[in-house]
Image (cartoon, helix red, strand yellow):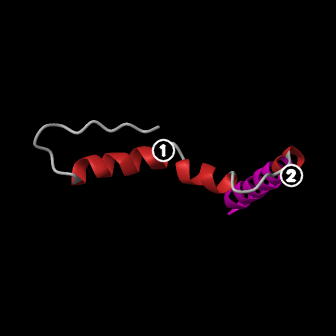
């Protein structure tokens, strides 16, 4: 649970901005979307391997250029 203290005399805009920043850092929305459906561990691992291979290929192409 994200807790944002509101200081005395502070407008609602600043705490709302702090909340949004904290929410992004904790990746709350990404977790909600990921938990929407069950994904097998083998499928998650396959996706991670494919993502890592893509990143590596992209980095090697940038190094050559």
Position of residue 2 relative to residue 60, above or below, is: above
* Separation of residues labelled 1 and 2 (CA atoms): 25 Å
Question: Which element type, helix, strand or loop, lies under badge 2?
Answer: helix
For label 2, the crowd category at 10 Å Cα-Cα, with few meaning under 14, some 14 to 19 and many 20 or more, is few
The chief SS type of the magenta part is helix
Q: Quadrant of the C terminus?
A: bottom right
Position of 61 relative to 3 (above/below): below
The residue sitting at 47% across, 49% down in the picture is: 24
Residue positioned 10% across, 43% down in the render: 9
**In front: 34, or 46?**
34
Which label was assigned to residue 43? 2
Q: Secondary structure at mark 1?
A: helix
Residue 61 quadrant: bottom right
The spot of residue 7 in percent (x, y) is: 18, 37
Residue nearest the viewer, comparing 4 with 54: 4
State the extent of the magenta-drawn residues as a range: 45-65
For disc 1, the marked residue is 25
Q: Nearer the viewer, residue 49 or 38?
A: 38
Residue 8: say if magenta. no
């Amino acid at each position: 649970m994200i807790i944002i203290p509101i200081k005395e005399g502070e407008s609602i805009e600043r705490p709302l901005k702090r909340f949004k920043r904290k929410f992004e850092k904790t990746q709350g929305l990404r977790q909600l979307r990921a938990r929407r459906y069950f994904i097998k561990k083998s499928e998650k691992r396959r996706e991670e391997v494919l993502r890592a291979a893509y990143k590596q290929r992209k980095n090697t192409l940038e190094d050559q250029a």
